């Protein structure tokens, strides 16, 4: 009989309690709240997944400042520390600080790192880090877009510099927003392939264009799949037509999902119309592919996602897919968005991308 599958869930009750945004409800910052994690844990408990013997609960690794320094400048670290001590602060337009921020952001890095480590050392088959604050916008020198430290980049740099792990890594970023932080860390790195599907907002002057393809040895390994606002379940997995052949040729040794749920239809920050089926089907697809390229070594790291009803359902759907089980979406998702499909726009994006990427991959 084959051994039972093990899914690692890495979290900590501090994520469900600390770093409460000091804003009135009208501010969009206020959605990055401890209830994001509390609602997930309550839901997983309700559907009896937390005491399932296949679920292995793990705590974040305790990281000290020297580990954060692998990815961030001393000035940035000091700034977060200083403002957290002060107990209040705003950095730029889109980052709030509380007395808990330094402590919790450090713990979030430890959560992502634990997810990668326990997948790589075979403790679990797949892992899911339920952590906050998110990380994919954070840059070496500064916090950005609700992100303090770059949880994924920091964990990869730890694998490289502390564990001598130099194998190939693919990051797939399904958050509604372009993970500009992650892209910048690995833009010239041939051994980290970054793929991002994101809502493209011309009016706000976003970055994350199709022709940002990496530089030097990293050329062809930064891949952006920008989509118009309002994509539906019918549209979401269209990107796999591009990514599937690329990953099959690249053959990563580890797959990391920068897992945001802000393309969910009820999300207050994103503007798309996905249901939890998209996340379920995505997970089935990537799991299949990872089985053939890297013995199924996948770690999901939570990024954004702010719908109190959607985030728990999406996490549930991912775990069901990782367990190779069927998934039935909750009743509040019985809404038909198919008439909103952005089929034509997405077909155009694929056409342009195929042309651009054809120089580096056979598509
Ligand atoms: Zn986002």
Image: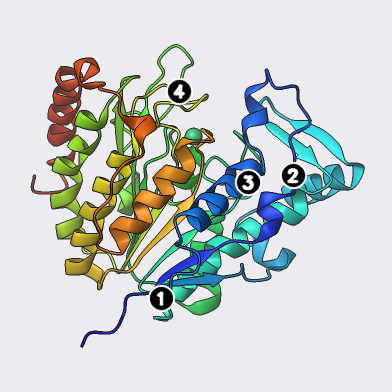
- Say which residue appears at 80% left-offset and 45% top-offset: 79
> What's the CA distance linking mark 1 and mark 3?
24 Å
> What's the CA distance linking mark 3 and mark 4?
22 Å
Outermost residue toward the bottom in this view: 1
- Which comes before the other along the chain, label 3 or label 4? 3
- Which comes before the other along the chain, label 3 or label 2? 2
Q: Disc 1 on helix, strand or loop?
A: loop
Q: Is residue 265 above or below residue 191?
A: above
Q: Disc 2 on helix, strand or loop?
A: loop
Instruction: Judge by depth and name the residue closer to the eye, 192 or 99.
Output: 99
Q: Which residue is mark 4?
A: 206
Q: Which residue is mark 1?
A: 124
Q: Which residue is mark 3?
A: 133
- Which comes before the other along the chain, label 1 or label 3? 1
- Which comes before the other along the chain, label 2 or label 4? 2
- Which comes before the other along the chain, label 4 or label 1? 1
> What's the CA distance linking mark 4 and mark 1?
38 Å
CB under 8 Å between callouts 2 and 4? no
CB under 8 Å between callouts 4 and 1? no
Q: Nearer the viewer, mark 1 or mark 3?
A: 1
Percent across and percent down for residue 316 are: 40, 51
Q: Quadrant of the N terminus?
A: bottom left
Q: Which residue is mark 2?
A: 19
Q: Quadrant of the C terminus?
A: top left
Percent across and percent down for residue 282 are: 26, 47
């Amino acid at each position: 009989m084959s051994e039972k599958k093990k899914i690692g869930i890495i979290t900590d009750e501090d994520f469900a309690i600390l770093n409460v945004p000091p804003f009135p409800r009208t501010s969009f910052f206020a959605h990055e709240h401890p209830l994001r994690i509390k609602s997930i844990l309550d839901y997983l408990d309700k559907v009896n997944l937390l005491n399932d013997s296949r679920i292995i609960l793990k705590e974040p690794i305790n990281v000290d400042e020297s580990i954060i320094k692998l990815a961030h400048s001393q000035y940035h670290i000091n700034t977060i520390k200083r403002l957290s001590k002060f107990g209040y602060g705003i950095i730029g337009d889109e980052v709030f600080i509380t007395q808990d921020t330094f402590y919790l952001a450090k713990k979030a890095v430890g959560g992502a790192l634990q997810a990668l480590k326990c997948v790589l050392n075979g403790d679990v088959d797949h892992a899911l880090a339920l952590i906050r604050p998110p990380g994919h916008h954070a840059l070496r020198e500064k916090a950005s877009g609700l992100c303090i430290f770059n949880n994924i980049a920091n964990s990869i740099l730890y694998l490289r510099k502390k564990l001598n792990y130099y194998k190939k890594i693919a990051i797939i970023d399904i958050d509604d927003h372009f993970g500009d932080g992650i892209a910048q860390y690995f833009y010239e790195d041939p051994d980290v392939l970054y793929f991002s599907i994101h809502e493209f907002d011309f009016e706000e002057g976003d970055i994350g264009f199709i022709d940002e393809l990496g530089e030097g040895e990293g050329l062809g390994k930064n891949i952006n799949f920008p989509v118009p606002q309002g994509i539906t379940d019918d549209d979401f997995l269209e990107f796999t037509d591009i990514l599937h052949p690329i990953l099959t040729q690249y053959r990563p040794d580890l797959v990391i999902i920068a897992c945001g749920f802000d393309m969910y239809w009820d999300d207050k920050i994103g503007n798309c119309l996905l249901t939890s089926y998209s996340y379920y089907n995505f997970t089935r697809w990537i799991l299949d592919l990872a089985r053939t390229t890297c013995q199924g070594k996948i770690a999901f790291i939570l990024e954004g996602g702010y719908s109190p009803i959607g985030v728990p359902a999406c996490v549930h759907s991912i775990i069901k897919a990782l367990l190779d089980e069927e998934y039935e979406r909750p009743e509040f998702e019985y809404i038909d968005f198919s008439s909103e499909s952005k089929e034509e726009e997405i077909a155009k994006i694929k056409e342009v991308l195929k042309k651009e990427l054809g120089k580096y991959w056979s598509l």
